[in-house]
Amino acid sequence: MNSKKYKAYWKEKALRFLIGKKKLLTLIALLFISYPLSAWAGQVVVNSNLTPPISWSWLNAWIFAFAGGCSSLFIKVEEIDKNVRLIYLAKPFMGTFSAIAVGMFLVEDVNAPGPTLVFYCYFVALCCSPIIQGLLIKLSEKGALDGIFGYFIKNKGK
């Protein structure tokens, strides 16, 4: 076996191994997407005079974010909802934390969240929960990540 065939053989073997590990690939993709966002959010908190979101001044934002997450339960998308276990916990959880993340972005230079922030928290939780849910389901479908990882493994040596 010459060197090129040997390399191609092991690249193909590695690709098949990765494709077989669908849950692991999904986790890696989600970590790949979320790590820069979380690092950026931490940097924003350190560089500004923002109060931590787990304080009494953020209580109104948390309440409205949770209310928006619970309201997202009334948005029914059958293709998405049939693939999620514990939908009554998943939608409020995703909506609440996405709303607080957007709230942290909006009040970057303000000490305490203002009254307008509660509207944004409610609206973001209401809208982002089904969107994030659909994105996670799309990424977890069989073959969704095969093309992405296959492209990187094929073009690594070029």
Image (spheres, grey):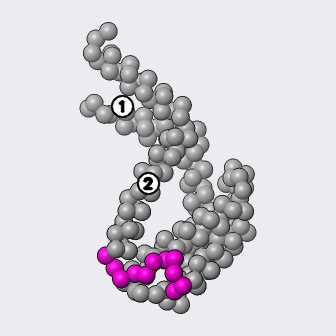
Residue 120 visible: no
Vertical comparison of 11 with 63: above or below: above
Q: List the single residue furthest toward the bottom.
A: 115
Queried whether the magenta region covers residue 92, the answer comes back as no
The Cα–Cα distance between marks 1 and 2, rounded to whole angstroms, is 22 Å
Which quadrant would residue 110 be assigned to in this image?
bottom left
Q: List the single residue furthest toward the top.
A: 1
Q: Mark 2 = which residue?
A: 33
Looking at numbered disc 2 in the image, what kind of residue is underneath it?
A: Ile
**First reached walking from the N terminus: tag 1 or tag 2:** 2
Which quadrant would residue 9 be assigned to in this image?
top left
Q: Main secondary structure of the magenta part?
A: loop
Residue beneath the point at 59% across and 43% down: 141
Residue beneath the point at 28% across and 11% down: 2
Queried whether the magenta region covers residue 49, the answer comes back as yes
Q: Mark 1 = which residue?
A: 154
Label 1 element class = helix
**Mark 1, other Cα within 10 Å: few <14 / some 14–19 / many ≥20:** few
Residue 112 image position (x, y, % from top left): 46, 87
Looking at numbered disc 1 in the image, what kind of residue is underneath it?
A: Lys
Q: Which residues are magenta?
A: 47-57
Q: How many marks?
A: 2
Q: From the viewer's perspective, is the residue at label 1 or at label 2 nearer?
A: 2
Q: Quadrant of the N terminus?
A: top left
Residue 2 visible: yes
